[in-house]
Image (spheres, helix red, strand yellow):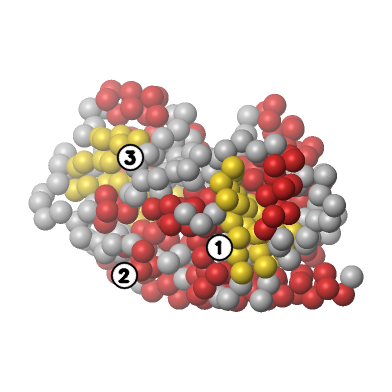
Amino acid sequence: MVRLTVMAHITGQGGVAVKTAELAKALDDAGHEVQEVYFGQRPEHPHLKERLAGAMVLARPTPKEMSMAITETEPDIIIIAYSTLMAMGGLPSNMTKRPPTIGVVHGQGVLFSTHPPVRKTMLTKISGPLLDSLDRIVCINEYLADLVMERISSPDKVEVIPNGIFPDAYPSWKPKDDRTKRIVFAGSLQPEKRLDLLLEAVTDLNTDDVALTIIGDGPMMAEWKELASRKDINCEFTGWISDPSETIAGSDLLVLPSDSEGFPSILMEAAVIGIPVVASDIDGNRAVLGSNAIYFEPGDPADLTSKLEQVLDGTAKDHIDNARDHVISNFQWSNIIDRYSSLIDHLKEASDDR
C-alpha cells in the first residue's frame, strides 16, 4: 500500500478541486492510503463536501504551513493539481526531503494561453521550471500533453490520463413535460466560453417557446446579462449553484459553445445524465464525447442555430443515444484508476531504490 498526499487549491466553483477529490476517492477505493490537503475556502459542491470532511483544509497557508501539512501526512508520493502548484509558486523549498511528485494538468489556462498579456509573460517564464520540478506530469488529453512537452526538458515524463466520473452520483434525464424547450449551459462565465454565440443562436431559432438557463459565474456575467436583455431572450442567470445536476436533468438540451476546452467534465456529466449535447467542434469536446454529440463550427452562430434545431425537433436522436455508454466505458473512475496505480507503483519502486 502506497501513502499518497493529494493536493488541490479550491477556487471559484471548485472544478479542479472536485476532480481532484474524485481522483482521491478512486485511489482510496483502489486500496491506496490517501490523505487530502486543500487550500482555500470550503465550497458547497456535494462532491467536495464528503471528501473535505476528512481532509486538511488551509485557507491561506504560508510556505511553512504548506511544508508542515505535507510533512504531517508523511506521503510516499504527492499528487498535486498543476494549477495549485502555480498558485503556490512551487512546492515549499524548506522541505528536508520532497517525496516523488505527480502534477496533474487540467487545462491550458495554467500554461498561459488564455490569460491576459502581462500574465501570459509571467506564466511562460515560470511554467517550464515548475513543470521540470515534477517527477511525472499527467495531462488529461493529448493536446495539453503536447503543450507541456514543448515547455520541459524531459518530455518522456508526460503521460495522458483523462479525468474520470462516478456515474451513480448523477440523476437521470427527465425533461419537463410541457411545450417550452429548455436549453442549459453550465460553467464559468469566461470570454472563451462564448455565450454570446449561444445568445445569438437562440434568437434565430424557429420557435419563441425557448427558455435558456445559464449556470455559473464569472467576469462576463454582466455583459452577457445585458446582451440577453437587449435580445429579449427568456434567460435566467442562476449564478453558481452547489449542484447543477438536477437543473441539467430537467432541461431538454445542454450546450457548450466554447472556443477552447481542456477536458470538460460537464460533458461527461451530461452524458451520464442522458441529456442531448450540442458543442463546438474542438479537440477538448471530442476527446470526451467522440461522435456522440452534435457539433457545430466554432464561432459560427448560424451553424449553432441549425444544430440546436436538429436536436430540439428530434432529428438528431441517433447521434446521441450512445453518449452514456461511451463515457462510462471510457471514463468511469474504476476504468481509469489502474493507470494511476501503475504510475504510482513505478515511482514508489524507483524511490525505494534510491
> What residue is shown at x 64% (from left), y 45% (from top)?
84
Residue kind at label 1, given as amino acid type? Ala
Image check: 94 left or right of 55? right
Neighbourhood count class around disc 3 (C-alpha, 10 Å): few under 14, some 14–19, many 20 upward: many
Q: Nearer the viewer, residue 225 or 65?
A: 65
Of the image marks 2 and 1, the number of the one nearer the N terminus: 1
Q: Which residue is mark 3?
A: 214
Q: Position of residue 162 (x, y in %)?
A: 57, 64
Residue 338 visible from this viewpoint = yes
Q: Which residue is mark 1?
A: 24
Residue 296 visible from this viewpoint = no
* Structural distance between the alpha carbons of marks 3 and 1: 30 Å
Image check: 310 left or right of 158? left
Of the image marks 3 and 1, the number of the one nearer the N terminus: 1
The image quadrant where one finds the C terminus is bottom right
Residue kind at label 2, given as amino acid type? Asp
Q: Nearer the viewer, mark 3 or mark 2?
A: 3
Q: Nearer the viewer, mark 2 or mark 1?
A: 1
Q: Eyeballing the image, is 342 above or below 57?
A: below
> What residue is shown at x 84% (from left), y 56% (from top)?
97
Q: Please, what secondary structure does the residue beneath circle 1 have?
A: helix
Q: Please, what secondary structure does the residue beneath circle 3 have?
A: strand
Q: Position of residue 195 (x, y in %)?
A: 39, 37
Q: How many marks?
A: 3
Residue kind at label 3, given as amino acid type? Ile
Neighbourhood count class around disc 1 (C-alpha, 10 Å): few under 14, some 14–19, many 20 upward: many
Q: Which residue is mark 2?
A: 321
* Structural distance between the alpha carbons of marks 3 and 2: 24 Å
* Structural distance between the alpha carbons of marks 2 and 1: 31 Å
The image quadrant where one finds the N terminus is bottom right
Q: Nearer the viewer, mark 3 or mark 1?
A: 1
> What residue is shown at x 28% (from left), y 41% (from top)?
213
